[in-house]
Image: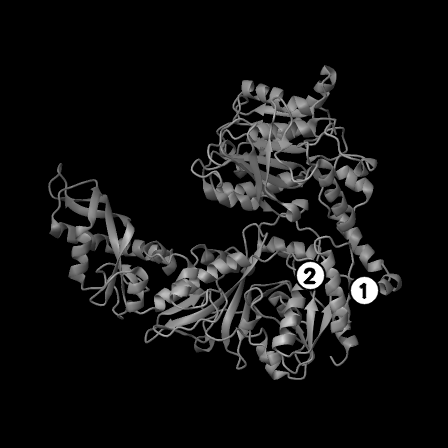
Amino acid sequence: MSTADELKEFFINSFIPIDNIPEDTAWRNSISMEARASMLIDNASLEELSSLFNVCINENVLTLKLPAPLSVQVTAPTTFPAPTTVGYTYVDVCYFWNFSDYSITKTETTDYFQISGRWHIKDSLFERSKCENLLTLNLHNAKPSFYWNDSGAVNILHDCSGKLQEELKKHFAEHSTFQLAESLTSYNTPGKICRFFRKEALPLSPISLSHHLSQLEEGVSTIPFEPVISGQSEAESIHDSLKSMFSAKRLLDSLLEYRAKAYERSQQFLFPFKDKDNYTVMTVLKCYDDTFQQKSFLPVTRWQVKQTLQQYCMAVPGEKKLSLFNLPELAACPDAPVILTDSLEIAALNQAKTEPEKLIFTSFICDDGHYDQVDWKPLKGRQLYLLVTNHSGRTFEEACLKVGKLADYLKKFQSVELQFVRVPIWYRPLPVLHSIQELISAYKAAPPQPYKEDIRILTPEEFETIRGMAEQRIGIPPEAWWKTERERIAISPQTSTDILEVANMNRLDYILWPFLVRGKSTLLYASKGIGKSALAHSIAACLSSQQKKRLFIENSWGASKGNFDSYKVLYLDFENQPNEHLDLLKRMCRKYWHTEKSETEKDAKNFLWKNMPEIGLSGINFTLPENHQKLLDLLDKAESEGESNHPVDVLIIDTYHEFTSLSDEVNTHRGLRELLRILNERNLATLILNHAKASDSQKMSGYNIIKESFAYVMKLWREGEQSRPLSEPITVSFDAVRTGWLGREQTVFKIYQPESPGRWHLYSPERSATEERNRIRDYYINVEKFGKEETAKLLGTSPASLYRDVKDAD
C-alpha cells in the first residue's frame, strides 16, 4: 500500500476488531515468575542449591527435611494367611507410607520409580535393595492389620510398587519445583529466588542458564498439536487442554508443539513467535478464565536437559531479547509498510486479511513499560504506523496514553520515525458466557464496530493533540471526543447513530440497580449468621414495595420503574423457620413498605415467601435436570399469586447449600448452568444465597467452580467473629462483575443497620447521596448516552428528580 489513502481504505473496509475482554497480566506474571523460579532451581548446581537451602551436600545428594511428612496411601489386593481359614486368601489392604525427606541429585541415574525431574524421595535413586529397605521402614498402619515381618513387607512393596509409583509421580506432577521448595528456604518467593541466582525478577525478561538446561528450537520436532477431546469441538478441546495445563501451574509435555488455529475468523489461541529463519522460538498461548471476564497471554518456551532426552515446556521467555511477531514477514518484505499494535490478536487476524507484500501487522509482548526487553531493530528504516485503537477492556483514551508511551520510547531510544492510525471501536456489553463457542457466537451476533467515519492517518503532531485531550479526559470521555471541531461539523453522523441504536437494543434491564438484572443471575455468599437472609429479605421488600425506596439510604441502589407498580419476588427459603421469617418481616421489611395497614398489604402481597421443608420440597438437588420442572412449576403457580397475571420478576433462593444438598459436584455444576440458562430465558433475575467457609469467610462453601455461572458474585464479610449485631458494619465486595456500572465502579464498602427495625445504611460513605446520584446520572447520560427519561427509569425516580438534592425519605 503505497499511499495513506490506500491504508485508510484497508482499515475502513477490511479491519477486524477483537473482543473487549480485559487482559489479566497479574495472572500471567504470577505463572511466569513461578516458572522462572522453578527453572533456576532445576538448573542450579548442587553447591548453589546447598546455599539456597542452607544444608550440606552428602555423596552428590542434597537431602532436604520436609516441614511435614509426605503421606502416601495405596490400596492393593494382598495374599496372606487369614486367621479363620487354612491357607492363603486375597484381601484388599490399605497401606500407608510416610516420607520425611526429599533428595536432589545431578547425576543422570534413572530413579527406581521412574519419576521424571531431579527431585525424588530420599534414597530412591540408589539400588533396588536400599530403596526397598527405606520403603519397608516407612510402611505404617496397614488396614486391616495383620502380622508381618520385614520379608513380608518386601513382598507387599512388590505388590504395591506400581500404584505407589503412580501416587508419587502424581505428587511431583501436581507441584512445580518452586512449590516443592518454597517451604524449605527463606528465599520463599519467585522474586527472592531470582535475586538469589542474580537474575532479573521480571516475568518476561530474558533468562540465561549455564548448568543443566538449554533452550530447544522448534525445528527439531514435527509432532503436531492436536489435543481434540471426543464430543467437543476443536476450540473447546484446546481451551480445556489449556485450563488443565494451568491448574497445576506446570506445562504439559503434550504442549511442546503447536499448530496455529483460527476459529471462524474471530478467535486464535496460539501465537508463534518465529525467528527470521522461520523457527519458532516462543509460543504465546491465549487462555480465557472460567467466567470469561478476563483473558491471559502466556509466553511458552521449550528447554532440554543437557545430554538427555528430557524436555521442559515452561512459561518463560527465551535467552535473547523478545522477537517481534510476524518477524519472517518483516524480513521477507523490507519495502512493505508496517502496522505496529500492542495486540497479538489484532496482528494475527488482520495479517490474514492482506498479503505481507502490501501490509505487515506486527506486535510484541513484554513487561508493562519495559520496552527494552524487545528487539526493535527490524523496524528501523521502515514505513511504520502505530495503531491507536481501544480493545480488551481499555477505553480509547487509555489506548492513546499507552501508545504514547511506546511512541516516546521508540523515538528516544530506537530513533524510529513513525505515524499513527486512529481506529476507535464500539463494543456492546457481552451476555453471560459459559464456553468458547458462546463467546464466538456472541462475537458473530453483534461484532465490534469501528467508527468508520473517524478512522484517520495521523501525523505525530496530530497524535500529540489527541494524546493531550486523552490525558485531560481520562475516565470520563463523552462519545467521539477524539474528533476535532472541523470533523464534528463536516462528518455525517449516520454510522454513529446506527451504532447507538444497536447499543440501545442491548442495554441491561435492571430490576434492582446495579446488580439484579433481567435475564441474569447473581450469587451472594457470607458466613452463617452475618445477615445475608436479613439483606435478602430487605431486597425483596424494596422490590415488592410500591414506594420505590432505595435499598441503602446513602446511594441509589434501588428498584427501577417497571411495567407494574411493584416487582413480584418468589423467595424459596430452606433456612428460616416461619417464626424467623416473621421476625425478619418485622425488622427488615416494614421500613421499606407503607405504614398504613391497607397499603402495607399491597406492598407485601408480591413478596411470596415459601417454606420449602413445610411444602415438602427439601432434600432435593434442584439443579439436576429431572428436578428442574419442580422449580418451574413453582414459578408458574406464583404468576397467579399476589398480583394476578403478574409473572415473577425475581427469584431468591436461600440457600444454595440446601437447594442442591451439595452433592454430585460435576452433575450439579452442569445442571446449575442449564437451570440458570432456563431461568434467564424466562427474563427474570435470580439471586442465590450461599454460605462462606467456616474456616475462611473470604471463600465460598461448596465448589468455587459455580461462580462461573453467575453475572455477579457478591460477598459479605467481617473481620474476626462473623455473627454479630447488624449495627456493626458488614463489608460488601464483588468477586465477579461481568458488565454494567459495577464493572467500572466496583469498590469495597460497608453497610449496617443503626436501628432495628430500620433500613440499611452505608457505613462512613465517601460521598453524599446527592453526590453519588450525580456521578451515576452523569455516567449514563454522558457516557452511555441514555436520555433523562431512561436514566430516571433506571434509578426509580422522575426526570426532574435527577437534578434535585436526594432526601433520606426518597
* 575 up-or-down from 175: above or below: above
> How is the protein colored in the picture?
one colour
Residue that carries the numbered disc 2 in the rendered image: 390
Amino acid, disc 1:
Glu
The N terminus, quarter of image: bottom right
738 to the left or right of 783: left
Q: Residue at x 66, y 51 (%)?
A: 430
Can you say whether 195 is above or below 179 in the image?
Answer: below
Q: Is residue 268 left or right of residue 506?
A: left
Image quadrant in which you'd find residue 113: bottom left
Q: Position of residue 248 (x, y in %)?
A: 42, 55
Q: Please, what secondary structure does the residue beneath circle 1 have?
A: helix
Q: Position of residue 649 (x, y in %)?
A: 68, 33
- As drawn, which residue projects farthest toward the top? 597
Q: Is residue 402 left or right of residue 697?
A: right
Q: Amino acid at mark 2?
A: Asn
**Could you say where residue 609 lies in the image, as x and y percent from the top left?**
61, 24
Q: Could you tell me which secondary element the residue under label 2 belongs to?
A: loop
Which of the two residues, 258 or 55, is positioned nearer the viewer here? 55
Instruction: Characterize the local packing of mark 2: few (<14), some (14-19) or many (20 or more) Cα atoms within 10 angstroms.
Output: many
**Residue that numbered label 1 is attached to:** 453
